[in-house]
Image: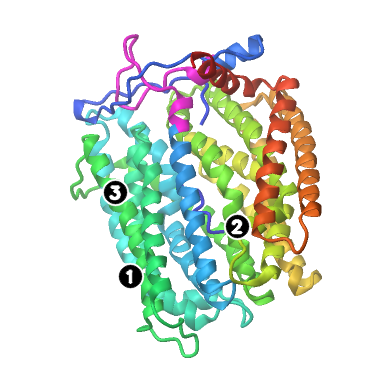
Amino acid sequence: MVHRNGNADPGTSPDAHPATSVRTASSQSRVAFASESLTEPIPAVPDEAVDELATEQTRVLSPVGSDSGPGSRKPSLLKASGSMAIATLVSRITGFGWKLILAYAVGFGVINDSFTVANTLPTSIFELLIGGVLTSVIVPVLVRAQKSDSDGGQAYIQRLLSLATVLLGVGTALSVIAAPVLAAIFVGGSNGATTELTTAFAYLLLPQIFFYGVSALVSAILQSKQVFGPPAWAPVMNNVVILATLGIYTQVPGELTINPVRMTDAHLLTLGVGVTCGIVAQACIQIPAMRKTGFRFRWRWGWDPRLSEFGGLALWMLAYVGVSQIGLIALTKVATAADPGAWAIYNYVWMLLQLPYGVIGFSVMTAILPRMSAAAADQDHQRVIEDLSLGNRLSTVFLLPISALMTALGAPIALALFSVKGGTGSIDQIGTALAVSAFGVLPYAITMMQMRAFYAMKDARTPTLIMVAMTAAKLLMAVTVATVLPPQEVLFGLVFTNSFTFVVGWLIGEVWLRRHLGALGSRRFLITLGKTLTASVAGGALAWLVGAGIDGLIPGSAGAVTGWLQLLIGGTIGLVAVFGAMWALRVTELQPAIGRITGLLHRR
């Protein structure tokens, strides 16, 4: 699952309370936010619950290391997550764009599969080394250090960076040496990716591990200081470099030679080196922002007793990543052994599913994590519950309708976006796979939010145990899919499996959080879920009918034009129907957004 887990669980938030202000000894560590005044939302439906939610969503977000007094004017969490959503949207669009261009340049065959597997290796190894720790555990740890240390946690952070840099350097070097072994582990058979080509790409792509680490370290420091802009925009730079690389690739004469594979092949070098340079750019562009916060890196050795606590969290996090990689390897081997191009298509579908999550769910989660960590540090479980509940409800309101439309318009989306090399067979597979797996968007977002709640409470053990259960379900289902389904349908079974495991994670996480925190406000969440689901099913059905009508009106075989018409017209009508129904059903969480739009229209 090349979703950067979080990354960036690709790494990583609505609002229920201001984060506890964290004062540092140095004014250099204070983070300046934009000072423009906030506009109070105008509730479209007068209701006490609406007023409460409006207050939650416009309450000031206090940055770590800054004062928050009556005269200070800081952006609300809605504004903070909104700006990140814009950056994430651009990042996801450009990221998906270069995947489309790659498909156009090489198709959905052996080259794409081999590159996709090789490009999975750096993220997989990075997560095993330290990536999961950096994207999940380190931000709460840094927030606590900034709260308690007289120097704002600077010495502690320097020790962490020194240790992490050495670990990343050694791990990267060993991974490059072990490239043939890693390729053999991930490649399942001769139908898809080839071990030789995957190995050749791996030699060029595995150095990304070190720069992924630098990027994640700097991003974690910035997020702990509640500076979200540079980490959110950095992946855009990565994608721009890769787009330029693919432009050069298409101009190189001839085609990439598969038999035999040569490391001196111009196409191989262009694609491998260019994609790695994108990650280098992603890391470097964040460094000036880190310096502006007042933080200065220098090598610092010696042991801080809190590193032992961090080490315990890190070990559980590494176990979490290791278990998740078992599931990834299983899916990779089943897909590459079943059908040429299946693994590449799987990843294209996963990227589509991550687009709404990345724009909405991840932005919400990233903004809320420092605040949730501060609340957990104060042992204020009620504030943790409020943040978690509001985050889940807002994710439901905005992700479930998109999930319904993806299910209804899977085929048109594939036609609109993938009318490239590879033939209609690949397009049909993408459309069906998207429709089969779109239900997993919301469970994925809620599962990730639950995991962050555990990490905020310095509990890395429970998420690992949840991942064990999810991976066990994934392995069982993957084996069943490979055994029962014919090769051409294995892809559909795998994408369904991936989405269903997040339903498993969601349910188990709910049970465990209740044991940790008590009642989670589930009644309010279930009311929101029920109303949103009703509206989404109605809107999705309408979008499907409109799409089918457009297909019937246009003569001949369906192509990109038909797909775009179905997507734009059907999607627009479907969304209007969904949100109109949600408004009629008085979905509380929707009202502040409607109020802001109404206010803007009134001012015009």
* Separation of marks 2 and 1 at Cα, in angstroms: 38 Å
Element assignment for label 1: helix
Relative to 385, does residue 191 appear above or below in the rendering?
below
Q: As shown in the figure, which amino acid type bears the numbered disc 1? A: Ala
Q: Which one is earlier in the sequence, the residue at label 1 or at label 3?
A: 1
Q: Distance between the residues labelled 2 and 3?
A: 30 Å
Residue beneath label 3, please?
Answer: 285
Task: Name the amino acid, label 2.
Answer: Leu
Label 2 close to label 1 by CB (< 8 Å): no
Above or below residue 245? Residue 240 is above
Q: Which of marks 2 and 1 is in front?
A: 2
Residue 207's quadrant in the figure? bottom left
Nearest the viewer among 310 and 586 is 586
Q: Find disc 2 in the rendering and name its residue.
A: 417
Residue 173 shows which numbered tag? 1
Q: What's the amino acid at mark 3?
A: Ile
Query: What is the span of residues highlighted in magenta in the rendered image?
Result: 55-82
Which dot, 2 or 3, sits closer to the camera? 2
**Residues at marks 1 and 3, CA–CA distance in whole angstroms:** 24 Å
Q: Can residue 504 be seen in this view?
A: no
N-terminal of the pair, mark 2 or mark 1, is 1
Image location of residue 142, percent across then percent down: 35, 37
Give coordinates of residue 330: x percent, y percent: 63, 67
Q: Give whichever of 304, 603 is nearer the camera.
A: 603
Q: Nearer the viewer, mark 1 or mark 3?
A: 3
Q: How crowded is mark 1: few (under 14 residues within 10 Å), some or many (20 or more)?
A: some
Query: For the stretch drawn in magenta, what is the main secondary structure?
Result: loop
